[in-house]
Amino acid sequence: MEEKLKAEEKKIGMTEAWLRKHRLLYTGATRHPFILSIRDGTVDIAAFKTWLAQDYLFVRAFVPFAASVLIKAYKESDDNTDMEVILGGVAALKDEISWFKNEANKWGISLSNVVPQKPNKNYCGLLDSLTRPEVEYSVAITAFWAIEAVYQESFAHCLGEGSQTPQELKETCERWGNEGFGQYCQSLQNIANLHLQKASDDELKNAEVALLSVLEHEVEFWNMSCASV
Ligand SMILES: Cc1ncc(CN)c(N)n1
């Protein structure tokens, strides 16, 4: 495929080539007004609480998807380290769920009464469709990387130089904006690139569509958090 050759010429991976091609959408997902409002300290706490409660539900739905990627890595990758990187991510989700429960408690949110809003339901529907065994590993790992990378880029931005993130939100930003999580996302991106290099044209098309769907759903998810204030 022409795009693959172009990426090779520029000595960049397929994922980077796609991010460049879809830069506006990627920026929309990683520099959303909600994120910018955390960074400049003007965030509406009601929006933050909505995000927190909805994201708790999302993360629960993310677990089976992550497990499906782990199964695909075991079955379809000839590199053992793929599985270990993904296993690390799956294992961290247990801690993440506990963190959401603790954080909700701190903010006086009862998670047992939270109802998923439409954009959240739609996003979880995408996760569910990507969990199917017939979805190729290269497609699933591309989506997996993109989901993690959006949070990493977004929350790292809230901690960067000149940020005025409120003290009580810093821990949240650290969760995804820390260096270790950044390295984990980089490992996922490397894995995705390696598999995309070997992928058929059809698989490439499916992976690019999956990436675009993730980015669109991420924007909708942030929109949802702001809108319900
Ligand atoms: C909506 C969303 N996207 C990504 C992530 C990072 N796992 C998350 N927790 N929530």
Image (cartoon, rainbow, N blue to C red):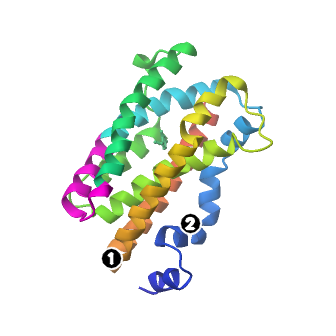
The residue at 27%/44% (across/down) is 67
Q: Which quadrant, please, contains the C terminus?
A: top right
Please state if 67 lies on the left or on the right of 148 as rendered.
left
**66 falls in the magenta region:** yes
Residue 183 position, x and y percent, is: 51, 51
In three-dimensional space, the C-alpha distance between marks 1 and 2, rounded to whole angstroms, equals 19 Å
Inspect the image, locate mark 2, and give the three-letter code of the amino acid beneath it: Leu
Please state if 90 lies on the left or on the right of 76 as rendered.
right
Q: For this rendering, which residue is in front, 22 or 13?
A: 13
Query: Please, what secondary structure does the residue beneath circle 1 have?
Result: loop
Please state if 93 lies on the left or on the right of 99 as rendered.
left
Asked which quadrant contains residue 76, the reply is: bottom left
User: Taking the image as drawn, is residue 220 in sight?
Assistant: no
Q: Name the residue under label 1.
A: 198
Q: Which quadrant, please, contains the N terminus?
A: bottom left
Determine crowd level at label 2: few under 14, some 14-19, many 20+ residues with C-alpha closer than 10 A: some
Residue 89 position, x and y percent, is: 38, 43
Question: In the rendered view, would you say 9 is above or below 56?
Answer: below
Magenta: main secondary structure equals helix
The residue at 48%/48% (across/down) is 148
Magenta residues? 64-82
Asked which quadrant contains residue 82, the reply is: bottom left
Please state if 189 lies on the left or on the right of 106 as rendered.
left
Q: Name the residue under label 2.
A: 19
The residue at 47%/72% (across/down) is 14
Residue 9 position, x and y percent, is: 53, 86
